[in-house]
Amino acid sequence: MSTETISADSPSAIDGLQAERRGWAAAAIFTALAMASLDTAIANIALPAIAADLHASPADVIWVVNIYQIALVATLLPLAALGEVVGHRRIYLPGLLLFTLASLGCACAWSLPSLLAARVLQGLGASGIMSVNTALVRFVYPGRQQGRGFGHNALVVAAAFTLGPTIASGILAVGPWTWLFAINIPFGVVAMLIGLKTLPCTPTASHAFDFTGALLAAACLGLFILGVGSAAHHAPPGLVAIEVVSAVLLGWVLIRRQADSPAPVLPIDLFRRPIFALSTATAICSFAVQGLAFVSLPFYFEDILGRSQVETGFFMTPWPLVVAIMAPIAGRLSDRHPAGILGGVGLALLSLGMALLAMLPASPHVVDIVWRMAICGSGFGFFQAPNMKALMSSAPADRSGSASGVVATARLMGQTTGAALAALCFGLVGREGATLALVLGAGFAAVGCVVSVLRLVATPQHRA
């Protein structure tokens, strides 16, 4: 391994930056992460306005969301692997630049094809940001404070995903849909200027980048997300089967091809580490719960409990509010206590909260809803930072890029799968699907709790 030259204080990039520079670097990282995370959530709210303005059908305009997700998820692992070869900074900053320019393209789009083209580029830029995000956090914060850094990272992602629809609704209340994309531009420029001055250059690997493996990984993940999205939108079963089976076959080819590689694009070498594999499975379970919850809860509050849209917005607030409180606390605790215990406690609370929501009486008091949502937020916020630290610290420093790519891939695949399962629940039992989705979410959280606790008995040399 060789290390890029950055400055006289370059060793600080190995075990964190000095306090002042660390604060500015964290500001650049988290600003860009918030932008990329928000864009996965806000576009849904704008679809009716986009369809009306660009004279597009609902079936066509849904690609504004789908094509961004496919471009994002398909390239996470390849860009993470490339970050190990060229340095994470050299992926992050161009990704941020592309995301900002593509946001301008989205704001200036004059037709649906032009908007879709800009959304592809925006998804690629977001992938550049997210693929190496946690790897940079690992190098920005010193080892004794990494739990705190991952706590802040978890807070940004959770708040952006949860508050995205509310923020989008507020912007649309005062301006056109193009503002949803234009608002990224000043934040992107500021984050870029700060990042150029403060982000560390990180160690680089000596192995070459596997372009063929990267293409296989991108096709595999892209087809999987496409298949899940097709199922959620009730596409013909044959088409869904073709997409999912093709993804599985490409994944099998990729694994066989890279079985002996020291740094495969799909990091099968890292999945041989018990802590890494268990932490990834725990992450997928937890974010599937989030996807199930935030698709089903608005329907649950309005169709099952008979509440208004304004009340529903109020009821959704305790979850992100408590996450904002708990995530930094859990991050600090993860610097002193095992992730298996902290994650297990968090997911047990999340499972309990989801089950209690599903069992609400027909006409619950406001307080009955709020404290149940607070339990869910507490559990979700308590889980994320310890799990992220366990996953990242179980990978060698020279494989931080691949580990970071897995963090983002697990999050997005969990959210996408959860949303698709929620849609399936509605398709199976109609309006009662909201309750079924909450029960299913409680089950996913319970499974994640068990998997988290298993880390306490994992191979000792890989324990987080």
Image: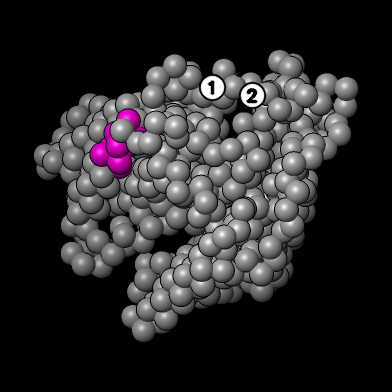
Residue at horizontal 38 percent and vertical 47 percent from the top: 281
Residue at horizontal 51 percent and vertical 72 percent from the top: 253
Residue at horizontal 56 percent and vertical 74 percent from the top: 56
- What secondary structure do most residues of the magenta stretch adopt? helix
Q: Could you say where residue 331 lies in the image, as x and y percent from the top left?
A: 47, 23
Q: What element carries label 2?
A: loop
- The residue where tag 2 is placed is 141
Placement of 190 over or under 271, stated as above or below: above
Q: Note whether residue 84 is visible.
A: yes
Q: Which residue is at the front of the view, 399 or 45?
A: 399
Stretch in magenta: 448-456
Q: Could you say where residue 212 lies in the image, as x and y percent from the top left?
A: 66, 69
Placement of 168 over or under 376, stated as above or below: below
Q: Label 1 is placed on what type of residue?
A: Arg
Q: Which residue is at the front of the view, 446 or 6?
A: 6
Calculate the distance from the C-alpha at mark 1 to the C-alpha at mark 2: 8 Å
Q: Label 2 is placed on what type of residue?
A: Tyr
- The residue where tag 1 is placed is 148
Quadrant (top left/top right/bottom left/bottom right) for the N terminus: top right
Give the colour scheme of this rendering. Answer: one colour
| Residue lying at the far left of the rendered structure | 361
Which quarter of the picture shows residue 464? top left
Q: Which residue is at the front of the view, 21 or 179?
A: 21
Q: Earlier in the sequence, mark 1 or mark 2?
A: 2
Whether label 1 touches label 2, CB < 8 Å: yes
Q: Which residue is at the front of the view, 332 or 391?
A: 391
